[in-house]
Amino acid sequence: MTTVYFVRHAQTDYSNPVDKERVLTKEGLKDRYKVIDFFEREGNRDRISAVYASDYRRAVDTVKPLADTLGLPVIE
């Protein structure tokens, strides 16, 4: 059975008018590590075989630490 988890991007800095290029705020950069904490608490971290994100910068930046920890690329 395949399980899919959806993660909403962390807090966005809206100062950039170009939606796809918006980065995360300082708080968002800190909060993205909560994704790793969640999967460690749930005991599911080792069962993740792929990490996907849209091509929006904030989406990729949110899941990048998880992907790096797992040694996986972020697939856009």
Image: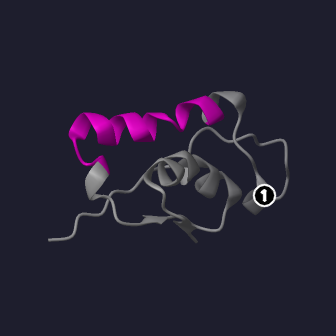
Query: At x 48% / y 62%, what residue is drawn?
Result: 72
Amino acid type of the residue tagged 1 in the rendering: Glu
Q: How many marks?
A: 1
Residue in front for this viewpoint, 74 or 12 = 74
- Residue 60: x percent and y percent? 61, 57
Q: Main secondary structure of the magenta part?
A: helix
- Give the quadrant of the N terminus: bottom left
- Residue 59: x percent and y percent? 59, 55
10 Å crowding of disc 1: few (<14), some (14-19), many (20+): some
* Residue 65 forms part of the magenta stretch: no
- Which stretch appears magenta? 29-45
Residue at image mark 1:
21
Query: At x 26% / y 34%, what residue is drawn?
Result: 41
Residue in front for this viewpoint, 74 or 7 = 74
**Residue 58 vs residue 72: left or right?**
right
Q: Identify the secondary structure beneath mark 1.
A: helix
**Residue 29 vs residue 74: left or right?**
right
- Residue 5: x percent and y percent? 33, 57
* Residue 41 forms part of the magenta stretch: yes
- Residue 30: x percent and y percent? 60, 29
Residue 28 found in image quarter: top right
**Residue 35 vs residue 56: left or right?**
left
Query: At x 83% / y 58%, what residue is drawn?
Result: 18
Residue 25 found in image quarter: top right
Residue in front for this viewpoint, 14 or 2 = 2
